[in-house]
Amino acid sequence: MERKSNNVTPIAICTWAFSNASKQAGEALERNAAALDAVIIGVAVEEANLKNTTVGKGGTPDREGNVTLDACVMAPNGDCGAVACVENITHVAALARKVMENTPHFMLAGKGAEEFAYANGFKKENLLTETATQQWKEWLKTSEYKPIINIENHDTIGMLAIDAQGDIAGACSTSGLSYKMKGRVGDSPIIGSGLFLDNDVGGAVGTGMGEEILKTVGSFLIVELMRQGYSPQKACEEAVHRVVTKNPDHTNFQVAYIAMNKAGEIGSYCIHSGFAMMKYQDGKNETITSPSFLK
Ligand code: GLY
């Protein structure tokens, strides 16, 4: 692929070992897709993956049995869009893009977002699978709300891409924490928390306990640290340290970040071991295990 002025071939990275997502996004970039198109393609893979219980269709419901999805996107020019607490729509990152492009607003939530989806050609789908229903019924027997690190928190797909023009875009999509309260919205649709980027600097996405990412505005923090000269790795470490310092209960939840700067350098860091990210570049799709605060 032709080299650009910043000497970086297209890259797609994403949270967790969502290898098909990074591959689809990376291959789209190699076909000269724009970064925003590529990240929508990438996260759509997991949104449609019925085996993924924390993103899209097949996601674990809230404690009342409703699957509610959150997503956001951010474009190289700084435009962004989001949807929160949306039911019956699988591809919520694409819907967030429609909010960005076709409304005067940043975010639509709940029924308004769902109606907007139908008006824009999205189809109504039952997101609650038989497997998720059985697991929810099992959970109801105790109704103990205690997200399991790296399992029930194995949530968001956050993806960043640099395209052949050197532009950066990002997307985030999740069904949020399993058995959350009805109406709960996490970090994933919130620009600056679940996702932030500056096309002059780089981008970051978060995954894990959304409440903690929100309280420390983690993705914004990482991008601003990179602006000050931090490497993506050091910036992710600082953002995790911020969470850890502010909350002594951090042994009981996971927070993880991945980041990429304009030069295509990447980094990742998390509280608990067990987190990995994907990177697709030059035809190579690799899983990268993240270093962690707690060993
Ligand atoms: N990080 C996803 C959530 O907390 O909803």
Image (cartoon, rainbow, N blue to C red):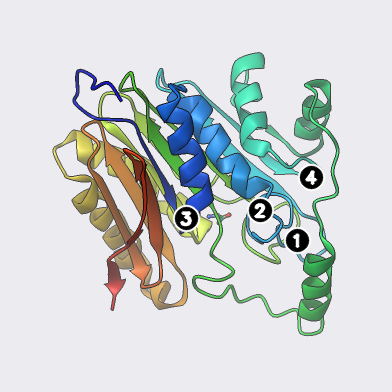
Mark 3 residue's CB less than 8 Å from ligand 1: yes
Name the amino acid, label 3: Thr
| Residue labelled with disc 3 | 207
| Residue labelled with disc 1 | 61
Name the amino acid, label 4: Glu
Q: Is residue 272 left or right of residue 230?
A: right
Does the rendering let one see residue 192? no
| SS type, badge 3 | strand
- Distance between the Cα atoms at labels 3 and 1? 18 Å
| Residue labelled with disc 4 | 87
Pick the residue in front: 153 or 265. Answer: 265
- Distance between the Cα atoms at labels 2 and 1? 8 Å
Lower sequence index among marks 3 and 1? 1
x and y percentages locating residue 212 in the rendered image: 45, 59
x and y percentages locating residue 253 in the rendered image: 47, 71
- Distance between the Cα atoms at labels 1 and 4? 10 Å
Image marks 1 and 4: residues in contact by CB distance under 8 Å: no
Marker disc for residue 175: 2
Image marks 2 and 1: residues in contact by CB distance under 8 Å: yes
x and y percentages locating residue 207 in the rendered image: 47, 55
Image marks 4 and 3: residues in contact by CB distance under 8 Å: no
